[in-house]
Amino acid sequence: LHQQKGMISLSPPTICNSAVKLPGDKTYRAALVEPPAREVLVRTPASLRQRLPRKFDYAARDEANRKLGRAGEQWVIGYEQQRLTELGHPELFQRLDWVSDTQGDGAGFDILSFEEDAHERFIEVKTTNGGVGSSFLVSHNELEFSKEAGDQFHLYRVFQFRDGPRLFTLPGDLSQHVHLKPTDYRASFRSLVG
């Protein structure tokens, strides 16, 4: 993917020295599936959970996840090119902005695309090699942005990436679609009140 003065063109993968490769199959519409339904599971009592110590290379995992995430975003850009072209608006693709690449993380979304009527579509991409029900991480910032942007926000959930990507989308407030569980806490000796 190359970008010059607001122009974007697809080219072979630009992920250097990476084991992650963009899939060759460009039948994006065939990859689209319905999202799984939310389920309610019975929680295992904390006293019965096992904590198994193990050595883990967090830096290597984080690097692999970054590469996979970037490859997933590239794949979604191809999907968006096809979607906008099929809608009869290939010119809107020329205005697409890969925000996480051009500006960095922190916007609450990865890609700025467009609806058929040229309204903005904010896309957050979550990519895994696991199946349709695989869990994925969502930042507090992404969750809050999904609420603020409402129907303009779309989470693109790309799964089975290595074996042939599949995709479903979740529009709007993520808390209406998925169960959310805090996984990290910021510890401080000061508390902000109000």
Image: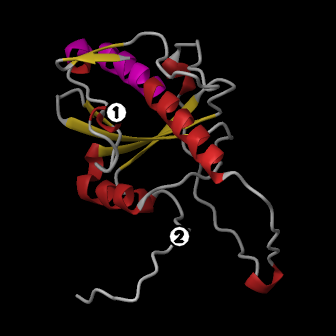
Residue 163's disc number: none
Q: Residues within 10 Å of mark 2 (few under 14, many from 20)?
A: few
Residue 127's x, y, as percent? 54, 38
Q: Which one is in front, 72 or 16?
A: 16
Res. 101 mark:
1
Residue 84 lies in magenta, yes or no? yes
Instruction: Judge whether residue 68 is colored magenta.
Output: no
Q: Name the residue beneath numbered marker 2.
A: 184
> What predominant SS class does the magenta segment belong to?
helix
Picture layout, residue 160 above or below residue 8: below
Q: Residue at x 28, y 32 (%)?
A: 102
Q: Which quarter of the rendering shows the N terminus? A: top left
Q: Amino acid at mark 1?
A: Asp
Q: Which residues are magenta?
A: 75-91
Q: Tell me where residue 159 appears, x and y as whole percent.
A: 60, 36
Specify the quadrant of the image occupied by residue 111: top left
Residue 27 position, x and y percent, is 53, 14
